[in-house]
Image (spheres, helix red, strand yellow):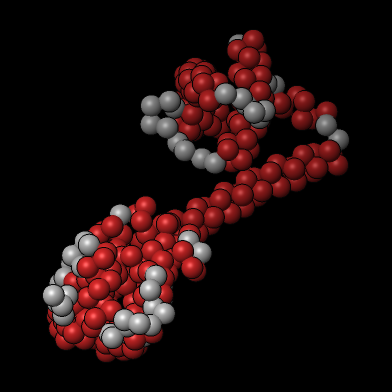
Amino acid sequence: MKGLLIAVCTLLGLALLPMPYGYYMFLRLAVCAYAVFVFLQEQKKGVCFGSVSAAAIALLYNPIFRVHLEKEVWMWVNAGTIVLFLSIMAPWSIIWKKVKGPVKVLFVLLVIASAAFAVVKYRENERLEKVATHERMQQEQARAKQEEKMECYRARKGSNTKEMVLMDLVLFATGDEGAKERFRVRWGEDAVSRLDLASEHDRAYMLGNRLMETIGDGDRDVGRQIYKNANNLWGTDVVTADQIWKDFQERNACVVEVEKKMNAINAEDWNSNGAEVFAKSFFKKQIQLKIPK
């Protein structure tokens, strides 16, 4: 009896130290088995402190329907279990009589303080868990809202037409997230990342090439000629891709303001039909002129 008591209390004491996960699983089994043994011994006396305490310990440590507590709480539970086992199995009535009054008071206060600390710690952990859960829910809601917004951007009617691509080029250069998302779908994440990381000059050059490819149906030279014809740029210093881009951006800067205003008024109608109608009308001249023979 005493050997089992010492062994179980030693196992519980070692559990106060950092131990591998398997040790705590073994501890559950050992403590539960010993608690059942103590319950059967104490039950012979009828319903008493020992039988009730042993039953509670067996339930708490049972390895089948496991009770999940924070590590800090388990430390106090393990310490309390040691005290309970000793109080049940050891002849405490004899020892208690020999203890002086002040020590008894100190012991009682220590037990009360320990219990209070365990309760406060448990409630604090519970509060932190609620805060963490609330933050996770907010993050999930934010992600869902962002994904819904991205889906709305991707679903803009007519987004693959020439006119809409030209409009998105202007918007993309100003950091518009809708245009960026549509380009991510159209050209891929890598192409958008290169544009984001490029210097101002390189970015203008790459956007100029995209502009000419769009106008020329994939042929930059054709696109360059159509754009220069449409805007009477022959004989000017607008020659390179970055120069053509800057000219295009300056001519169509008003598109950015239109996009902002219409999204503010009625984003759903603007994305479902308005943007396409506006783009076709606004960019019609720039992409329909043919190369002169």
User: Which residue is more in the foreground, 49 or 141?
Assistant: 141
Q: Is residue 142 at all visible to an observer of this figure?
A: no
User: Which residue is more in the foreground, 14 or 32?
Assistant: 14
**Residue 253 vertical placement versus 208 (above, below):** below
Q: Is residue 132 at all visible to an observer of this figure?
A: yes
Residue at the image position 66 percent from the left and 19 percent from the top: 10
Quarter of the figure with residue 230 = bottom left
- Residue 12, x across and y down, in percent: 62, 24
Say whether residue 30 is left or right of residue 93: left
Quarter of the figure with residue 102 = top right
Residue at the image position 51 percent from the left and 40 percent from the top: 69
- Residue 88, x across and y down, in percent: 61, 25
Quarter of the figure with residue 220 = bottom left
Which quarter shows the C terminus?
bottom left
- Residue 163, x across and y down, in percent: 20, 76
Say whether residue 96 is left or right of residue 2: right
